[in-house]
Amino acid sequence: MNLRGIVRRSADADLVYELVPNLDCWFGGVPLATNSYGFRDREWVRPKPPAVSRLVALGDSILFGPGVDIDATFLRRVEHAASERRARRGLGPIQTLDFGVPGYNAFQEAALLRASALTFEPDFLVVCAVDNDDQLPAFLARSSTTGEDDALQSRAEFFLGPDAQEKAEKVRRIQVDPGAVSEERVPREYRRMTGFAVVETSLREIASLAHERRIPMLVTIYGPQAGPDHDPCPHADRHAAIARLGTEAGFDVLDLHPIFTRVAEAHGWRDIRALQLGPGDPHLNVEGHHIVADAIVERMAALGWLDR
């Protein structure tokens, strides 16, 4: 199963697309199951079970965890480790809810929080920011090739509309550089979703929704370029802007770049490709997920989330 096969159009124009509910298939070389709400997680119940604290996580494919078994993803590891620590204090478990959808950006994550995530009564909120959160969601950039551009209105229609199977070969020929999508390649109806100003606005909205409900919030930042060959961070200005926004809007920020760089230096690596799925694929492998989980749990402990 490929990405086109596990998503469908969303009735919510701000989400554009969503994962298909109740999937039971293979994706990225590992089993993939989605719950009845259309997320890669166990079935969730409402209202929240007694004595359980819920941690809702928003993000894209880094959170979703392609190529990694669900129990090895960093969010599931956070659940196990945090619950063990809380049990030693006589507290109930933490249940993590994975709202990660491949290709989502910050705009969609804010929309997803509004639309459904808050209805699951989170006690804690983690937003998994990535360096391309200012870019278009998956499927939405027009091709830079004139012939391809004439054939579609947007990549959403191209992937999710009629005759998608017949167009599969054309899909493989479309190459979009996520860091260089010019405005003319963005369908007009989606231009409101792009740009770093939209990232900041979306994070402010998420923080405001969390603050209204007294939900503590942590933003993690992941970029695939880390290690001595990428120090200082190529996107240090954006990471610093998110940190400043956290101070203003009242959320904590965990920048994973220095953590991964220290791991790379300790192993004598020039970069973190050994912690990614493979050449050209920046998604984290099992060991990479383990590192992120440890970092998040330690930050949760420092913030007092494991004591309440």
Image: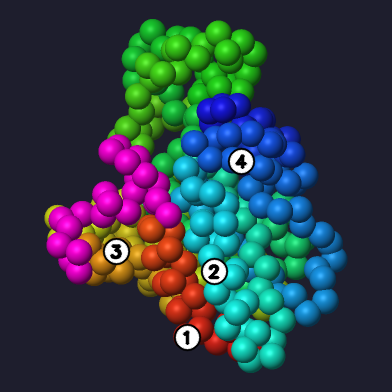
Residue indicated by mark 1: 302
SS type, badge 3 = helix
Q: Please tell me whether residue 171 belongs to the stretch shown in magenta.
A: no
Residue at figure coordinates x 27%, y 51% from the top left:
274
**Tag shown at residue 289:** none
- Quick one: label 4 or label 3, which is nearer the N terminus? 4
Residue indicated by mark 3: 260
| Amino acid on which the number 2 mark rests in the picture | Val
Task: Report if residue 210 is visible in the image.
Answer: no
SS type, badge 2 = helix
| Label 2 close to label 4 by CB (< 8 Å) | no
CA neighbours of label 2 inside 10 A, class few (<14), some (14 to 19), many (20+): many
| Label 4 close to label 1 by CB (< 8 Å) | no
Q: Which residues are magenta?
A: 265-286
Residue at figure coordinates x 57%, y 76% from the top left:
82
Q: Nearer the viewer, residue 145 or 288?
A: 288
**Tag shown at residue 78:** 2
| Amino acid on which the number 3 mark rests in the picture | Phe
Residue indicated by mark 4: 32
Residue at figure coordinates x 46%, y 78% from the top left:
299
Marks 2/1: CA–CA distance: 14 Å
Marks 4/3: CA–CA distance: 27 Å
Marks 3/1: CA–CA distance: 19 Å
Instruction: Return the x and y of residue 13 as percentages of the image width and height.
Output: 66, 37
Task: Decide if residue 266 is on the left or right side of residue 78.
Answer: left
| Label 3 close to label 1 by CB (< 8 Å) | no
- Quick one: label 3 or label 1, which is nearer the N terminus? 3
Quadrant holding the N terminus: top right
| Amino acid on which the number 4 mark rests in the picture | Leu
Q: Nearer the viewer, residue 305 or 210?
A: 305
| Amino acid on which the number 1 mark rests in the picture | Ala
Instruction: Return the x and y of residue 291 as percentages of the image width and height.
Output: 39, 65
